Amino acid sequence: MIIEENLLMKIYYSYEELEAPKDTETVEGHSYDIYRRLLDNGTDDRNFSVCQDKQDKLMYLLEFDSSNIENSLGLFMINISTHKIYKINIAYGEERDRLTLSGIWCAYGGLIGYDDENREILIKMKGDREFLGYHLYDEFDNIFLDDRKIDYIDHDSLGYVQNHLDESKYFYVLEGYPGVVILTKTVIYLGKQILKTFISYTNGKNWAYLQLKNKQNSPCESEICDISILPGDKRLSDVLKYSPLNPLLIVAPCTITIHSMELDTRLMISDDGGFTWIYTYIKFISIEILKEGEILVANEDNKYLHVSLDTGRSWQKLNERKSNDKIIQLIPDTEFKYNVVMVSKNDASGYYISTIDFSGIFSKSFA
């Protein structure tokens, strides 16, 4: 791969702060703050690519027209701790033509943008006063600006795994919790081949089936159920979500099976590292973990937000009066504190970026 600095490419950029008025809402005696900004970019369908700078606590959103995902329409930076939203304007050349990006990467205060059409890479590291432009003479697949971690497991479990896995797709070592391994593999049950999920707390020396912690309002109230995590064409690491501050708390799509028949798949929560799972009586599209799990925030039908203060056993609906907005994306704070960023759409007015601060409801429980 050949990359060289483009000394002829003069790059101009500016940060435009977008006013985001604060609105305090109350539900069941609890208050939370929303800082909401209309992007004023029309009502056509949009896609948003997200990059989180975990070290500098920044989030970047790259906006695309859904009918043309090659070139961006806008780049936004969000400082979640201050709830400030900025539009980053980037131009180049003497005419200051707007530069469109195809992708972004960020970490440690640095930002990299890529213009696929012209094969130009823009780099601005922390402390730099300007973007530098580089021309790429070859194609590339990805850029990494983050650190990597390697996990080691017992060699006996490796032999066990290699006999049952397809390219290690269904094998996962829980980071931050040494010895915990989750495995989905094919077994013979009632004469049929089915996928079952097992968990080991001993680096693969002993295995156990997953269990349901609560049966209320579930298909298992009068039946014996099996619980499995079936990633489909994804990996277990793609569908398991947990807080690095509390790896015991996990969110995953769990499938309930009775007599080898799959009955229901929905997001469930485990608060013991993946052994038992809490059945959610509402079928959520996503569940986000804030900080160590003191607050869970869930998306119902891309229409309503719910919060839970008891690891998913009970839920409180929040934004009923704003049900005309469609939730596009819900993104937790990079440090898993009490803030989330939400991208939403109102068919009449357009797209909004919001930061939501849930710290006001942390110290109490809903009745």
Image (tube, grey):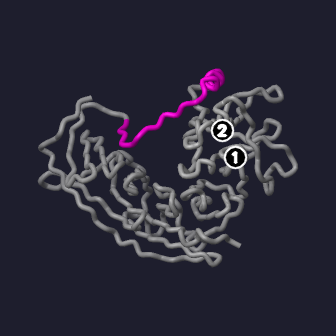
State whether residue 141 appears in this view.
yes
Residue type pointed to by label 1: Thr
Q: Is residue 50 left or right of residue 114?
A: right
Residue type pointed to by label 2: Leu
First-in-chain label (2 vs 1): 2
Residue matched to label 2: 230
Residue plotted at (70% across, 63% down) = 314
Residue matched to label 1: 265
Q: Which residues are magenta?
A: 142-164
State whether residue 329 appears in this view.
no
What is the secondary structure assignment of the residue under circle 1?
strand
In the figure, 138 relative to 222: above or below? above
Mark 2, residues whose alpha carbon is within 10 Å: few (<14), some, or many (≥20)?
Answer: many
Determine which of the numbered discs, if any, sits on residue 167 in the image.
none
Q: Image quadrant of residue 15?
A: bottom left
Q: Image quadrant of residue 86?
A: bottom left
